Image: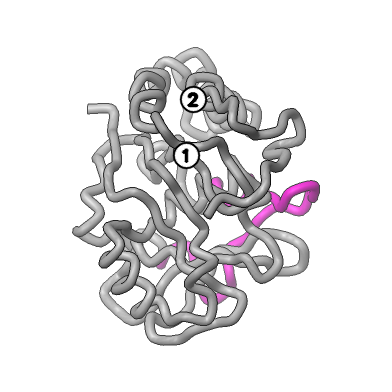
Amino acid sequence: MYGRPYDRVGDRMSDDRFDAAAEFDSQLDRLVKLGYPALAGQTEETFRALLSPLRDAAVTGSAGLRGPTEGRVPFLLVTTRELVPVPERIALTTLAGKRKTGILDRNFPADDLPTFHPIKELEVPAGPAYLLFDVDRGEEYRNVAPSAALEDMTAKDRLPITIDEGLAFVTLYPAALASNRCFSLVGSRCGDRRVPALWISQGAPKLGWCWFGNPHTWLGSATANPVRVGLG
């Protein structure tokens, strides 16, 4: 279920007058404001030109969906490690209304990140960016092991989200990550029992990992519509 509307980045409220085109523009503007073009080695003009072709697909793909709430959003403009590395992106995240920037957990060294890839069931588009639809932080899976959550969400025709998608979620909607409302990223795996997750540590987002078979009362498993739309 959708929760009450809330102020996403401090400049407007979401309600039933959801405008998908304006929302896409707002997400792209936020990435520019945070400095993504420079991190990608591009000018702002080039960066916007690269991602703007996804605008029409965002409008079409989110038809019938309600506007963003604290726990669920109609779509995300996802950037990948091909465009900006994970450590640089986690460092640009914050909690809603906070200034302290996100970090990597000490048990999740940067040279370990390249070993985590999207699971094959997701069919993630190749390239620097793509769209993900109907994204939910998965509160229903709090205190449920990621292994059991994956089985349940799949039965409901939904799939988990990846590290790139989780970073997009918290970057574009900081209020999505909240106390006792953190989430696993079951869509990224490296061949062992670890599952990446985003949680809060010392007032900031943290990207770490938990175990596939271990439940946590404060940790759900985020989900999304299985369809992803790329630039190609």
Question: In front here: 199 or 151?
Answer: 151
What's drawn in magenta, residue-wise? 88-112
Q: Residue at x 34, y 31 (%)?
A: 61
Which of the numbered marks, if any, corresponds to residue 20? 2
10 Å crowding of disc 2: few (<14), some (14-19), many (20+): many
Describe residue 4's horizontal placement relative to residue 230 as left or right: right
Total numbered labels: 2
**Whole-percent x and y of residue 223?**
41, 58
Residue 91 covered by magenta stretch: yes
Residue at the limit of the structure toward the bottom, as seen here: 214
State the residue in front, 3 or 107: 3
Distance from label 1 to label 2 (Cα)?
8 Å
Q: Amino acid at mark 1?
A: Pro
Q: Mark 1 touching mark 2, by CB under 8 A?
A: yes
Q: Of the residues shown, which amino acid type is indicated by label 2?
A: Ala
Q: Residues within 10 Å of mark 1 (few under 14, many from 20)?
A: many
Where residue 188 sits, quadrant-wise, is bottom left
Picture layout, residue 180 above or below residue 22: below
Where residue 216 appears, as percent x and y from the top left, is 55, 82
Position of 32 relative to 224 (above/below): above
Q: Quadrant of residue 199?
A: bottom right
Look at the numbered disc 2 and give the secondary structure of its residue. helix
Query: Mark 1 highlights which residue?
Result: 74
Q: Looking at the figure, which quarter contains the C terminus?
A: top left
- Which of the labelled discs sits on residue 174, or is there none? none
The answer to whether residue 86 shows anywhere in this view is: yes
Q: Residue at x 59, y 66 (%)?
A: 182
Q: Estimate the x, y position of residue 143 in percent, counting from the top left.
A: 53, 81
Q: Residue at x 29, y 41 (%)?
A: 228
